[in-house]
Image (cartoon, rainbow, N blue to C red):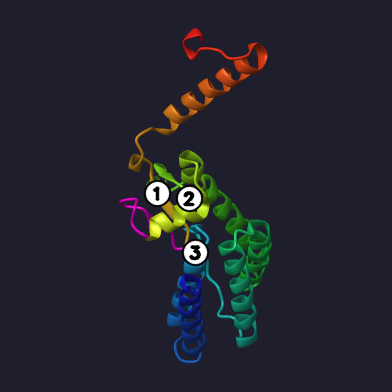
Amino acid sequence: MMMQTINQEQDHLWESVRILSQIDTQKAQAVFKATIEKSLQQMDMRLPVFVKFPLSIPSEEHLSQLREIEKKMRSAYADGKNESAYEHLVEYIQQLSQMAEDPSMIQKKLLASLLASRNTPAQDDVNYYTPNEAAKKLGLSDQTIRRMCENKKFPRAYKTQGGHWRIPQDSFVTTPRQDETAEALLKRIDHKNREAGDVDEFDL
């Protein structure tokens, strides 16, 4: 349902670009860039340099190609097929760069900006778990954690624009560092048990 809504919103934006390109080029360019930015945000990416690039409005055929690539990219990312999603992303960047005066330079800057955005986590994401991390912490399945999020079991848990849950770390009693310490201790206990039979943890 979530993906269907996102697809409908993006289709509406792409259609707006197509119609505006025949009426007002300047507005069409603004909506076109907003459409691209929103598409990348749905993959948890930011592209701050994109708004600075002068791009020509693509033909209807080119617009159609971009829309199809975007759908494939978004669908693959939503399904957790990251490698496939990134392959479509590279194709997406290549298509966009062809609308600039210097395609090679624009392509390099776009890729560099994307890599920088992926390697610099947003401040809001620093203290959040993914469903997979929360599942490991609680000994539950990813599906159970997502269901708990849907049922509002974790206060302030939210979905990213890409449809992925983020769960505040302070929703749990222990911190990540405490979890690591406990896990390390359990491993030591297990190791000693295998070497010398049962061992009292107080002997550690």
Residue located beneath label 2 in the image: 131
Residue type indicated by callout 3:
Gln
Q: CA distance from mark 2 to mark 3?
A: 17 Å
Image position of 49 (left or right of 93): left
* Label pair 1/2, CB-CB below 8 angstroms: yes
Residue at 49%, 46% in the rendered image: 140
Q: Which mark is residue 35?
A: none
Q: Is residue 194 above or below residue 31?
A: above
Residue located beneath label 1 in the image: 167
Image position of 172 (left or right of 49): left
Relative image position of residue 89 (x, y in whole percent)? 63, 63
Residue located beneath label 3 in the image: 42
Residue at 36%, 59% in the rendered image: 151
Residue at 50%, 91% in the rendered image: 22
Relative image position of residue 23 (x, y in whole percent)? 46, 91
Task: Residue 159: say if magenta.
Answer: yes
Relative image position of residue 138 (x, y in whole percent)? 46, 41
Residue at 40%, 55% in the rendered image: 148
Q: CA distance from mark 1 to mark 2?
A: 7 Å
